[in-house]
Image: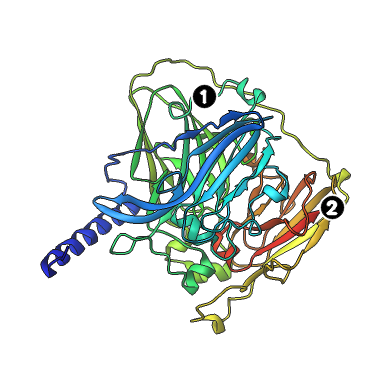
Amino acid sequence: MSISRRQFVIGSTATAVALFNLRRSFAQQGEQFSNELKIPPLLEGKPSVNGKIYELTMQAGTSEFLPGIATPTIGFNGSYLGPTIHGRAGDQLILRVRNLLSEPATVHWHGLRIPARFDGGPHQLIEPGAVWEPSFRINQKASLCWYHSHTMGRTGEQVLRGLAGLFLIDDDESGSVGLPTEYGVDDIPLVIQDRRFQRDGRFDYPMSMHDTMMGYKGDVILVNGSVTPHFNILRQLTRLRVLNGSNSRIYSIGRDDGADLMIVGSDGSLLERPVSQRQLRLGPGERAELLIDAKANQSFRLMSYPDSVHAGPMGRGMMMGTMSDNSETFPLLELRAANFETINVSIPTKLIQVPNWLPAKSTLTRTLTLDMAMMGMGMMGRSNLSGSMGINGRSMSKERIDFEVPAGSIEIWEIRNSTPLPHPFHIHGIQFRVLDRDGAPPLPQEGGLKDTVLVDSGSVVRVITEFTRAASAEYAYMYHCHNLEHEDAGMMGQFVVV
């Protein structure tokens, strides 16, 4: 079908207007949040003799984020993002992952304590048309984990286009404390992402030198793939399970009515007791569980406020006045309450007992220094920045094992950030406890198990964990910055457990 020049101009103008109006909403709070929040479908698994079978298909499609404009996307069992996989501690899972894309990809089970051969790192590439079938038993605390592409050098692009989803784990202990548990009703998942769009509606992912150095930042916020969404609160207590699914943006989440957030969970577990504070800072890959105690006929918004911790002096000099500074205030989601089914619900004051490891039991302290070798003027204009970042002076190589960890050992990892930017640091295959930040106690919201921790410029964060899962040179575990552009540029290493 042919299209006239006049029709093309009209269509281009409409797209430009839609983009302009959408971008205005990023910084302005007066927009109407008219889109209902999408809730990812729950994938429970089909019982079989050998365990629960979960079918996942990576596929291409289109999604409408902007009114009347189709955006090419990829996802699991749909055109963008994927279903929420639901399992319980003790379940044996069989995941059949089929790749119907025209490109190879991997699926990493972020936050799961599973053998490295099923971890889904860069070594477990799924070619187009192939099926990967990892099988493992869930043996960890109830938590909100997630799954996403971890393809070598292409993680940022594939996650941005839609290859990500949530992984929800329950257990008897967490079910006994009285938190909301009805998925999609009073137990709500929130995947927060930022995106940029080209004039034709496609995602804008140019991977410039600036994007690699600072990390990709978008000017449109998506929550579960919804733009300017609202959610109707049905009960007095609502549980929000929040994932920072952005490539690099840090969010400082708070309520626009000035009320405190009640934080009940971290990456890998609930906290021992709720923590009340005005804002929650969440780096890429980090998760948190919030408990909303709402009043009838009340509406308020979850906002992202300027990051209270900025980059070091060198980073600030480059970023001030730009969105890379996380210096803007913008809305994420509007929560609307009407009349509740129940009122005067009690809020739990104690939650669970969080596992811990004593530093005296540690057999080794490892120092990992995050490096960026790209701050000089000589890097300006360089288009291929692969290998421009590293850890302990070395960029990622699939051909090199960086160190071996004895099986069953307890270790302290000291993460040092020598760069001008903050970095979310993630370790595969384990959950850890944060010991301290620059010698001071960890933040109150870091009292649970974690697998990703935000390390600010010039800071030192120490974590402690026990390594109980085997990892071979063929299928190693990764450790890396979860700013996906930094990861793709080489700020990653690999270790084995022997």
Residue at figure coordinates x 18%, y 63% from the top left: 13
Q: CA distance from mark 2 to mark 1?
A: 41 Å
Relative horizontal placement of residue 448, taking residue 364 as reference (left or right): left
Residue 498's label in the rendered image is: 2
Amino acid type, residue under disc 2 in the picture: Val
Residue 167's label in the rendered image is: none
Residue 426 sits above or below residue 398 on the image? above
Q: How is the image coloured?
A: rainbow
Residue 275 location (% of width, % of height): 59, 33
Residue 140 seen: yes
Which picture quadrant has residue 418? Answer: bottom right
Residue 238 sits above or below residue 407 on the image? above
**In front of the other: 468 or 254:** 468
Among numbered discs 2 and 1, the one appearing first in the sequence: 1
Label 1 sits on residue? 180
Residue at figure coordinates x 14%, y 63% from the top left: 10
Q: Secondary structure at mark 2?
A: loop
Residue 119 sits above or below residue 420 on the image? above
Report crowding for label 2: few under 14, some 14 to 19, many 20 or more residues within 10 A (C-alpha). Answer: some
